[in-house]
Amino acid sequence: MDTNLNEQLAAWIATGGNRLGQIQIEQSDEATFALTHVDDIDQPRDSLILLSDLAAMRAWTRSNEAGDLRPLKTSPDLRPGWLVLA
């Protein structure tokens, strides 16, 4: 991730920003951000599936909990149960 983008994201979080749609964003340390579904905020991180690369993230977002295709990635039916560290 671009350093300037990291700094901008950290500044946004410092002012109280932490959510984009159904995605919760938390700063883990100076260089790492944790992204989870808003429904998973109180879940222990080790109980979530770690999506470690772009292909895994894309595959996860293709379907909702019922297994139906999500043609619009902005639709409010993102499956919970995952963690991304970026």
Image: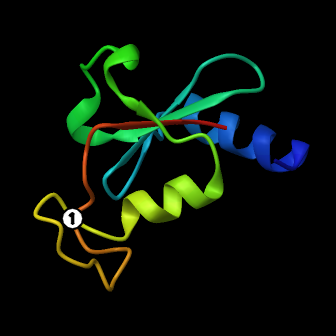
Which residue extends farthest bottom? 71
Q: How is the image coloured?
A: rainbow
The percent coordinates of residue 84 (x first, y second) are 53, 38
Q: Residue at x 20, y 64 (%)?
A: 77
The percent coordinates of residue 76 (x first, y second) are 21, 66
- Where the C terminus falls, by quadrant? top right
Is 31 placed above or below 12 here?
Answer: above
The percent coordinates of residue 64 (x first, y second) are 21, 64
Is residue 15 visible in the rendered structure shown here?
no
Is 58 placed above or below 14 here?
Answer: below
Q: Residue at x 25, y 79 (%)?
A: 69
Which residue extends farthest right? 3
Is 68 placed above or below 37 here?
Answer: below
The percent coordinates of residue 34 (x first, y second) are 54, 31
Q: Is residue 8 left or right of residue 23?
A: right
* Frontmost residue, 3 versus 57: 57
Q: Residue at x 24, y 19 (%)?
A: 42
Q: Residue at x 48, y 41 (%)?
A: 17
- Local SS, label 1: loop
Q: Quadrant of residue 62?
A: bottom left
* Frontmost residue, 50 versus 5: 50
Q: Tell me the amino acid under the disc marked 1.
A: Asn
Which residue extends farthest left? 66
Is residue 10 visible in the rendered structure shown here?
yes
Q: Is residue 26 left or right of residue 46?
A: right
The residue indicated by pointer 1 is 64
